[in-house]
Image (tube, rainbow, N blue to C red):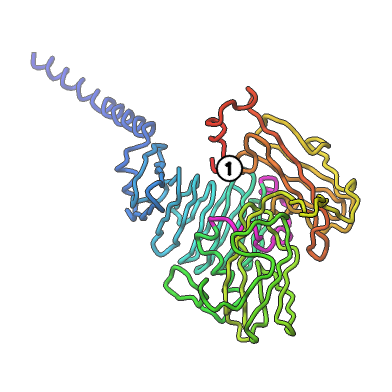
Amino acid sequence: MTRKRSSVSKNLKDYMVPIAGAVLVLLLIISIFTGGTTETETTKENKTGFVLTFDNDDTEAKIIYPGGKEVKIASDATLYKWEEVNVINGWVSIQLDNVAQAKLAKLAETKYTDNGEIYHKSSDIWLESLADIKVITKFTDIALRNGSVLSISENEMSTTAYLLKGFAEISNKAGKSTVLAPGQKISISRMDAKNEDFDAKLAKADIDDYYKQLDWFIKNNGASYLDALKNPNTEDKTSTGTTTKTPTQSGNRVLTFSNISDGAQVSDSTVNVIGNYSDETIVKITLAGQEAQLNKTNKSFKFENVDTSLNENDLVFRAIDDAGDVLERKIVTVYYDNAVSGSTGGTFPVKNYQVDASQFLFTAPSKNNVFTTTNDFITIKWVVKNKNIWKVTVNGYQLKSYNKTYGTWRYHAATKNNNLQLGSNVYEVKYYDKDNKVIFRNTYTIVRKTAAGWISTQKSWGTYSNEA
């Protein structure tokens, strides 16, 4: 009997080791497939959290954990490394301690990685760097210097970076790089992201006027950084605590206008602006980087071909004296009614251009200037036979694809870019000569329908606004 019990005990000992091993393997498999717990995700090696602040009560956002779990968050939440924040509605601010201050727009998807990089996946991010950092997007790698201010707009088609202050070196995924100067932008498309022949230097351009009128630019006080570039003797206003010498709207009244007024409507997408100034020390009057023609004899000024093609146009005028100080900063808002008014004499004016309109041809998606589709991505193509055209814009956006030698260019309209909605989408095309004067304009219309045809009710139609 004693031998038998000893044999049983020995057999049990023999099985304990493989059983324990099997249990450990099973626990490991369960851990891998469940992705761990929230406690594991938030207890990283440094346990340092970053504060998220909501812009207003309507802001919504969620955190996506490394294991894929999504949790909707409230204001003043905490974000840890490798946790992704996704802004559903409104704007969110993040304080990355000693690294950067970031602001995220609606639909933004961003995370701060374990190796100290910011990975931005979609929509807009505004960065004020407090250290040298690297920013990764779908199509670019960006090295941002300490003390720089950079805005990035990311979508499925391209990455566009706008440098307001400091230093940024930007390259595509093939390593073709360039350095932006403050006041410059660069856009790298999906097609160019891995192109080893991509010339990044040629892709640079000045920050355009259309971007300066966006709510995103205005709310982030972008104009103050560009003002500092024009007036280097003034202190720059940043979130680090320095002050700015910036004239207020209610400051010295030295500018008066003869043909425009605040809140007025204009009947053309470009206007000439004329007026007078009262201070003899004024040497320069600017509007969106353009200097006015000054007549010192009668103290008058004139801007030619001012772009007023948006529904609401904020024109920011600055009067600068001989010491480089801004004596007055005046904002005049005008509205484009998109119609030509008839004269009181009973005649109806006709827009006339001293060019041959047959030299400006649409080639795709149709040769006619109206195209109907159910697709959510359309490329419009043109050919310009007039050799006096130096640049082309579509709804205020200057095309980089315009080739003056061949006269060809293209423009992408896509629902993801918010420039193709259900209904009739009108794209106003302007053609400029070497003096930056509009010498011709035409339009292309894309009528986008659902597969079932037109939406029948006004309520349903309203859900497809430009803000959707």
Please name the residue that numbered disc 1 is placed on.
466
| Visible residue check, residue 212 | no
Question: Label 1 amino acid?
Answer: Asn
x then y, percent, for residue 128: 49, 63
Q: For residue 321, which quarter of the picture?
A: bottom right
Q: Nearer the viewer, residue 372 or 140?
A: 372
Residue located farthest toward the top when viewing the structure as drawn: 1
- Which quadrant holds the N terminus? top left
Q: Nearer the viewer, residue 166 or 227?
A: 227
Say few, some or many: other residues with alpha carbon within 10 Å of mark 1 (under 14 / 14 to 19 / 20 or more).
Answer: few
Residue located farthest toward the left when viewing the structure as drawn: 1
- Which quadrant holds the C terminus? top right
x then y, percent, for residue 336: 66, 53
**What residue is drawn where x is 51% and y is 73%?**
250
Q: For residue 64, which quarter of the picture?
A: top left
**What residue is drawn where x is 88% and y is 48%?**
357
Q: Main secondary structure of the magenta part?
A: loop
**What residue is drawn where x is 68% and y is 37%?**
424
- Asked whether, in this view, residue 452 is left or right of residue 355, the answer is left
x then y, percent, for residue 309: 69, 54
Residue located farthest toward the front when viewing the structure as drawn: 345
Q: Is residue 201 magenta?
A: yes
| Visible residue check, residue 376 | yes
Q: Nearer the viewer, residue 295 or 60?
A: 295
Q: Is residue 167 magenta?
A: no
**What residue is drawn where x is 86% and y is 47%?**
360
Where are the magenta residues, as a range?
A: 190-216
SS category of the residue bearing label 1: loop
Number of marks present in the image shown: 1
**436 vs 53: above or below:** below
